[in-house]
Amino acid sequence: MSNKGEYVLTNREMNLLLALVQSLRKGANKIFDKKDNCFTNKSFRELEKLTDKSKSSLQRLFQKLESEGLTRTVINVQNEEVLMLKPSFLPCSYSMYETYFKNAMFHLGSHKSACEWASRCRKDYTLYDYTDFCPTKITEINDINTGELIITGVNKIRPLTLLEVKKWNEYIVSESITDRTKRRQSVATAA
């Protein structure tokens, strides 16, 4: 990162990254999964053949992305380790719920943890900070005077309205959800 907090990629590196992300290849030749903001597990040699870009330029790009903190290895829905591109750097979502979920997946390191985070947010009507979320740290205290349930042990970003939670629940079972693998899961565990 630069001193100003900006990500530094040269025009050439950014163009190469966009070529990988926006590749039209599908199936076994797929390079980047926009539904999860993850690169497929291809070797540099395979990427070189698929993109006609040099292996050394691809290696330099991935090293730069890693040194800038723009990629992280996460566990996807199929329990495979994949390299995830930071969603806030290059968003590939049109839904705010998908954006929340992808950011949580990036910071928490797995699809399963992000599902727990999303489920807990909807359950408590609170958008929790996904950078330090840990379900085991959460404690619920019942206030004797008011009878209110107070949740501690995790940072809160803001409360969610009833309408936001309702729309989020509707979204995760709708046809508009981007990741079909998440749609197949039950409402309680999906994005």
Image (cartoon, rainbow, N blue to C red):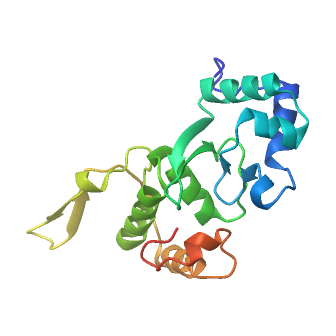
Q: Quadrant of residue 86?
A: top right
Residue drawn at 46 percent across, 78 percent down: 162
Outermost residue toward the right?
52
Q: Is residue 180 left or right of residue 134?
A: right
Depth check: 110 or 138 in front? 110
Residue drawn at 39 percent across, 63 percent down: 116
Residue drawn at 86 percent across, 43 percent down: 50
Judge whether residue 6 can be spotted in this image. Answer: no
149 w.r.t. 13: above or below: below
Q: Quadrant of residue 125?
A: bottom left
Judge whether residue 15 can be spotted in this image. Answer: yes
133 w.r.t. 140: above or below: above
- Picture coordinates of residue 168 (x, y %)? 54, 74
Q: Quadrant of the N terminus?
A: top right
Depth check: 38 or 29 in front? 29
Outermost residue toward the left?
144
- Picture coordinates of residue 18 (x, y %)? 83, 41
- Picture coordinates of residue 99 (x, y %)? 62, 57
Q: Report the label total.
A: 0
Outermost residue toward the top?
3
Q: Is residue 161 left or right of residue 103?
A: left
- Picture coordinates of residue 103 (x, y %)? 56, 50
Depth check: 85 or 139 in front? 85
Residue drawn at 51 percent across, 52 percent down: 105
